[in-house]
Image: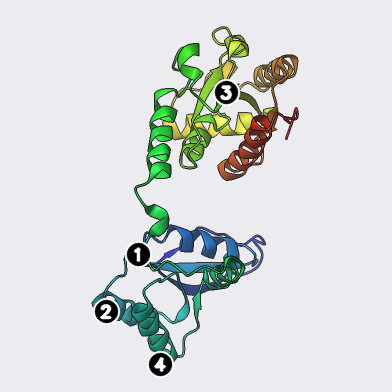
């Protein structure tokens, strides 16, 4: 069980006072699904900041008693993804006694799927986290991303990738590769470095999809300056110079267009949004219907 903390959401209107509220997330597994759902829902409300209380791996009556004590001390909404019937009933009864709203977050979707498929529900806790083929594929993809990060690896080794990301420095190549690895996608990345690496060698790849990541010069200068400040490093004139950066990004974009690589502008995209666009392009590539941009 984790201590309560604000979820990191900030009100979109800085002139308006934020509304804080407690949300209790109860899971008999890792809690990742529930946490993601809660964040997606609360993001729909302006000026609302949830204080999250996360209870993972709740699998006994004693653990549930402790959860209900925490709920009583910080009244709020209770969301859960409990599979065990007895634990669900214990939580539901406890919330009724405390007059707290409780919601089985997956219930509507599970019910609809059950009716459509005409299949009985599994009561196995944490079924989505089984040590199966998909799990080991994700681990292998993570190993791959770390081994072939930042231009590492020969062309022969890069042929084992599903996708190779190419772009100038600070275009979120590494975190995007790591995120894709958690989806089971083997991703490598090659940085474009003026005078050293131009990415031309990637044109000889036959199997992976090569995607160019672009960014606006102004945004790139801001990101690079922030990185230098955080590292307390001496600023490099070429690395953060507005004109030098503009020239660097223009050359990268033109190189991508000349090679016919699909491109993604990451200027205002989160890693998750960039990864989603890559997944779409990869799906099109596998179906031999690839476009030129996203």
Where on the picture, by quarter, is residue 115? bottom right
Residue at image mark 1: 56
Farthest residue, direction top: 195
Q: Are marks 2 and 4 in contact (CB under 8 Å)?
A: no
Q: Which residue is mark 4?
A: 97
Q: Which residue lies most toward the front here?
A: 118
Say which quadrant the N terminus sits in.
bottom left
Identify the mark nearer the N-term, 1 or 4.
1
| Distance Cα–Cα, label 2 vs label 4 | 16 Å
Q: Residue 235 at what x, y percent from top left?
A: 51, 22
Q: Are marks 4 and 3 in contact (CB under 8 Å)?
A: no
Q: Nearer the viewer, residue 195 or 255?
A: 255
Q: Residue at x 70, y 28 (%)?
A: 288
Horizontal side of 70 relative to 150 (left or right) equals: left
Is label 3 in a helix, a strand or a loop? loop
Tell me which numbered mark, 2 or 1, is placed earlier along the sequence.
1
């Amino acid at each position: 069980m984790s201590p309560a903390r604000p979820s990191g959401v900030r009100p979109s209107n800085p002139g308006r006072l934020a509304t804080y509220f407690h949300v209790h997330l109860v899971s008999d597994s890792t809690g990742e699904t529930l946490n993601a759902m809660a964040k997606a829902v609360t993001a729909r409300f302006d000026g609302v900041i949830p204080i999250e209380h996360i209870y993972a791996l709740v699998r006994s009556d004693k653990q549930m008693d402790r959860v209900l004590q925490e709920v009583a001390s910080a009244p709020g909404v209770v969301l859960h993804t409990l599979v065990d019937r007895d634990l669900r009933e214990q939580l539901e009864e406890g919330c009724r006694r405390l007059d707290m709203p409780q919601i089985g977050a997956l219930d509507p979707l599970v019910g609809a799927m059950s009716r459509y498929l005409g299949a009985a529900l599994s009561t196995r806790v944490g079924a989505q986290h089984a040590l199966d083929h998909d799990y080991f594929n994700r681990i292998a993809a993570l190993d791959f991303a770390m081994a072939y990060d930042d231009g590492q690896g020969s062309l022969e080794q890069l042929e084992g990738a599903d996708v190779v990301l190419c772009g100038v420095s600070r275009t979120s190549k590494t975190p995007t590769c790591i995120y894709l690895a958690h989806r089971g996608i083997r991703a490598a990345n090659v940085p474009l470095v003026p005078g050293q690496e131009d990415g031309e060698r990637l044109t000889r790849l036959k199997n992976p999809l090569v995607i160019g990541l672009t960014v606006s010069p102004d945004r790139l200068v801001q990101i690079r300056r922030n990185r230098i400040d955080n590292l307390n490093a001496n600023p490099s004139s070429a690395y953060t110079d507005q004109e030098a950066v503009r020239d660097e990004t223009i050359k990268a974009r033109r190189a991508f267009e000349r090679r016919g690589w699909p491109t993604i502008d990451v200027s205002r995209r989160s890693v998750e949004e960039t990864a989603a666009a890559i997944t779409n392009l990869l799906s099109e590539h596998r179906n031999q219907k690839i476009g030129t941009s996203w």
